[in-house]
Image (spheres, rainbow, N blue to C red):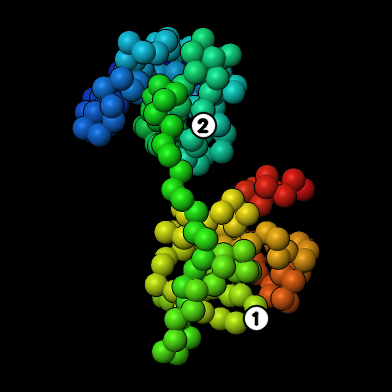
Amino acid sequence: MEMGIVRVLKERSKDIEQFKVILEDWIPKDASIVIAMEGSYVYCSASIAHVQHKIMEEVHRQSVAMQVLKNRVKTEILIDESIFGTPYYAIGYPVIIEQQEAALVIVLPSNYIPEKPEHYRFLTGKQEDDWTPIPIDQVTHIESLQKRNWFYANSEQYKTNVTLKELQLKLPEYFLRIHRSYIINIYFIKRISRDFASNFVVELKNGSLLPVSQSYINDLRKVLEF
């Protein structure tokens, strides 16, 4: 494995450096850039604010890099000083280098934690020619259907101009995306079961049956702890 990584470093060093060149245009100067693959760190451009990872050093099991390598999803986390001696905020991205899965991690001082946007307190929906503000805790779920976006509350359907991606950023924590087409309010879940093909299905208290895609099942399990 070690020889394989060394070969990748030599053959793809220019490609790895390109990550740094691109990222330096938008990340703070006191940020570090770390790349890990096959369980080891293979690149580090460290600022003076952080401990420099040693090349070929094993990736810490609680680090952001390890979570990205295991789960293959973007990961953001605040790490306390127990791992590297100083707290830090990190954002990790899954990338491919030399046809191998890798983790690209931006390490920032802990004071760079971004402020969370204020949550929606209501959604304004359209029915025919009327617009109605609906308290957010009354919304059972949100749906993307035929290139339009809808939300449901009190057995009524409302059209909204806000996309699911935009909604996901500002909805309260009790809203959870379960499919590319659905976001649900977990307080309106009646039960979670499997269909005839053993795929998970969420039944809401209003009788709606919504599929859970494989991309989001781990999020559902983590939040609801089942």
SS state under label 1: loop
Within 10 Å of disc 2 (Cα), the crowding (few <14, some 14-19, many 20+) is some
What residue did someone put label 1 on? 155
Residue 222 vertical position relative to residue 45 in the rendered view, above or below: below
Report whether residue 51 is seen: yes
Identify the residue at image location x=43%, y=32%: 113
Q: Position of residue 206 (x, y in %)?
A: 72, 76
Report the label total.
2
- Contact between marks 1 and 2 (CB within 8 A): the answer is no
Q: Nearer the viewer, residue 152 or 98?
A: 152
Specify the amino acid type for callout 1: Ser
Within 10 Å of disc 1 (Cα), the crowding (few <14, some 14-19, many 20+) is few
Q: Position of residue 53 (x, y in %)?
A: 43, 12
Residue 174 vertical position relative to residue 67 in the rendered view, above or below: below
Q: Is residue 39 left or right of residue 5?
A: right
Q: Could you give the CA–CA distance between mark 1 and mark 2, rounded to whole angstroms?
A: 38 Å
SS state under label 2: strand
Q: Closer to the N terminus: mark 1 or mark 2?
A: 2
Q: Which of the 4 image quarters holds residue 142? A: bottom right
Report whether residue 19 is seen: no
Residue 217 vertical position relative to residue 206 in the rendered view, above or below: above
Residue 12 vertical position relative to residue 82 in the rendered view, above or below: below
Q: Position of residue 186 (x, y in %)?
A: 68, 59
Q: Nearer the viewer, mark 1 or mark 2?
A: 1
Specify the amino acid type for callout 2: Ile
Q: Which mark is residue 64?
A: none
What residue did someone put label 2 on? 77
